[in-house]
Each structure stands twice: as C-alpha cells, then as structure tokens.
Image (spheres, grey):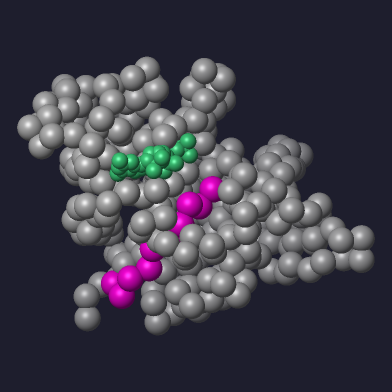
Amino acid sequence: MNEFKSGFISIIGRPNVGKSTFMNKVIGHKVAIMSDKAQTTRNKVQGVLTTDDAQMIFIDTPGIHKPKHALGDYMMKIAKNTLKEVDLIMFMVNVDESIGKGDEYIIELLKQTKTPVFLVLNKIDLIHPDQLLVEIEKYQKTMEFAEIVPISALEGLNIETLLTQFKRYLEEGPMYYPKDQISDHPEQFVVAELIREKALHLTNQEIPHAIGVNVDKMTKAENEKVHVEATIYVERDSQKGIVIGKGGKMLKEIGKRARRDIEMLLGSKVYLDLWVKVQKDWRNKPNFIKQMGYREDEY
Ligand SMILES: Nc1nc2c(ncn2[C@@H]2O[C@H](COP(=O)(O)OP(=O)(O)OP(=O)(O)O)[C@@H](O)[C@H]2O)c(=O)[nH]1
C-alpha cells in the first residue's frame, strides 16, 4: 500500500478571489465539520479533504484579510508563524484583475517564508487563454513559486490537477481528523487544534512539533458553561518550562486566547483547564497517538 500523506495547507488571498468557492468545490458539504460559529474564529480550519491515501487540512491565514488594520507587528507575526508552520501555502489570486496592493502585501509576507508557495490563478474562465501567460509572467517577476496552477473554482476547471500537485508536496503523516468520526465529535479535535495553535504561536521556540494536545474531557455544566479539560504534551522538561512560563504566565496566556476562540467555536461560555505533561518521545508511540484521537491503522 502507498504511504498515507497529510498536511496543513494555508489558504491566502485577498477578498473575493474565490477562496470560499474553491473550498466548496473541493470539500462540498464536508465543510460542515464545524458549526457556523466556527466560521467566525480566527485562523480557522476551512475544511478537511480526506481521500484513500491523503488528508489535506485547509486553514485560513489570520492577519491577512484587512491589511490596513492588520499591519501591526503582532498580526504580522501571527501570519508569519502560521505560514511557517503549515506544509504548503496556497496563494490564490484573481487572474482577471491586475496585481493589487492586497496581493503585494501578501507577496511581501510570502517572500519571508520557506514554506512552498503555490500560486493559484483563479477565474480562468473569465479570460482568453493568451492572456493567461501574460498574467503568469507578471507574477513570476514578483517571487519564486513552487508551482503555478491556473484554475476555475466556479467551473471546476483544473481542480484535480491542483490537488494532485498538493499531494506530491505533502509528506507521509497521520490522519489528523478521523474520516468517519467527523460529524460525531468534531469539536474535540478542533478544540485541541485551537489550543495547540495558541501554544505554538506564543512559545515561538524550537518546540512546535513537540507539542501535542489532547482534550481529556468536555462537559456542559448546569450554568451552560462548557468545561474543557485538556493536556498539552511536550517531550522534555525544558519544553514544559517554556509552555508554563514564568509563574505560569505563558500557560495562562495560551489558555486565555484558546478560550476566546473555543467560545466562538462553540457559541457558549467556556471554562478551560489546561495541564502540561512531559511524555517522552510521544510522536513515536502509536498507542499514545491513538489515545490522542488519531487512528492507529491510519497512522
Ligand atoms: N467567473 C468566476 N467567478 C468566480 C470563480 N471563483 C469564484 N468566483 C466568484 O467570485 C466571487 C467571490 O468568490 P468567493 O469564493 O466568495 O471569494 P473569497 O475569496 O472567499 O472572498 P472572501 O470571503 O471575501 O475572502 C463570487 O461571486 C464567486 O462566484 C471562478 O473561477 N470564476
């Protein structure tokens, strides 16, 4: 059997280029893995595409949508961190419009990351084929792209080619989101991802891949508050120290930010209890991975 590949793909592009149309075409109704509330969270998972031999998790890139308001260092840092941590970047542009300020802003950001960038020229149905080459050349002058793929999200043109190319770039990896459990308890996975994401962004150290999060318990209390208990797993004591921070400051901040997003996701008040544990070499322990929600046979 072929190896199973998986990875995170950050979608980036200015408003109206067709990102939602693309997601709908690729994932269709499966986008409904999360409640509508999730659509208001920052840095949200847009959709998960699972095939027999691969899983692609498309995520939004925060700090990008309103460059005018988001130029602050803080938002730039979040955007950069997100782009650094994903496996691929999908930069979508409208081929029927000239390169605008919004695109230039994104290109500047993309130049600073080592993650492979796919330039996806959308809406090819609106232009003459001769024009396509001209547009491609314009973009090629701005930076180096791993691949350039013209598509029409609306008409479904060349989408399969794009997905095949994505797969070529992804590495062997686990199935982060179970194929069939998605509609049952999707929240737990998303909640874990939100906590992990905050921990990654805030620690900004060499530990990202050593952080795993498990949601141990999620219950609704009488006052309608959702009580979430989760454990952040790291591989070494030193990493535990970083995640907890001086006087517990870091952990508190991770909790604060994660809670905000979880509340938006679930649409209710949340009480978040976070623990940090050292589990040596957790990434190489199949049972542990399974316990964290990944299925062993898919791993
Ligand atoms: N002709 C044509 N129109 C498209 C294509 N893809 C998207 N559109 C149209 O472009 C408009 C914007 O598409 P969206 O998918 O909402 O764009 P978006 O990037 O998600 O926009 P934001 O949510 O504002 O970031 C819609 O009217 C779509 O129907 C395409 O391939 N061809």
Q: Residue 209: x percent and y percent?
A: 45, 52
The quadrant in which the C terminus is found is bottom left
Q: Is residue 23 visible?
A: yes
Residue 92 against residue 24 in the figure, above or below? above
283 to the left or right of 267: left
Which residue ends up furthest to the right in the rendered image?
Answer: 223
Q: Residue 109: x percent and y percent?
A: 37, 26
Residue drawn where x is 45% and y is 74% of the image:
179
Magenta span contains residue 224:
no
Q: Residue 242: x percent and y percent?
A: 61, 43
Q: Which of 232/35 is in front?
A: 35
Q: Residue 262: x percent and y percent?
A: 69, 52
The segment highlighted magenta reads 44-53
Residue drawn where x is 69% and y is 61% of the image:
230
15 to the left or right of 288: left
Q: Is residue 232 visible?
A: no
Residue 40 against residue 220 in the figure, above or below? above
Q: Quadrant of residue 7?
A: bottom left
Q: Quadrant of residue 165?
A: bottom left
Q: How many marks?
A: 0
Magenta span contains residue 49:
yes
Q: Main secondary structure of the magenta part?
A: strand
Q: Quadrant of ligand 1?
A: top left
Residue drawn where x is 82% and y is 66% of the image:
220
The quadrant in which the N terminus is found is bottom left
Residue 193 against residue 257 in the figure, above or below? below
Which residue ends up furthest to the left in the rendered image?
Answer: 130
Q: Which of 65/283 is in front?
A: 65
Q: Which of 93/279 is in front?
A: 93
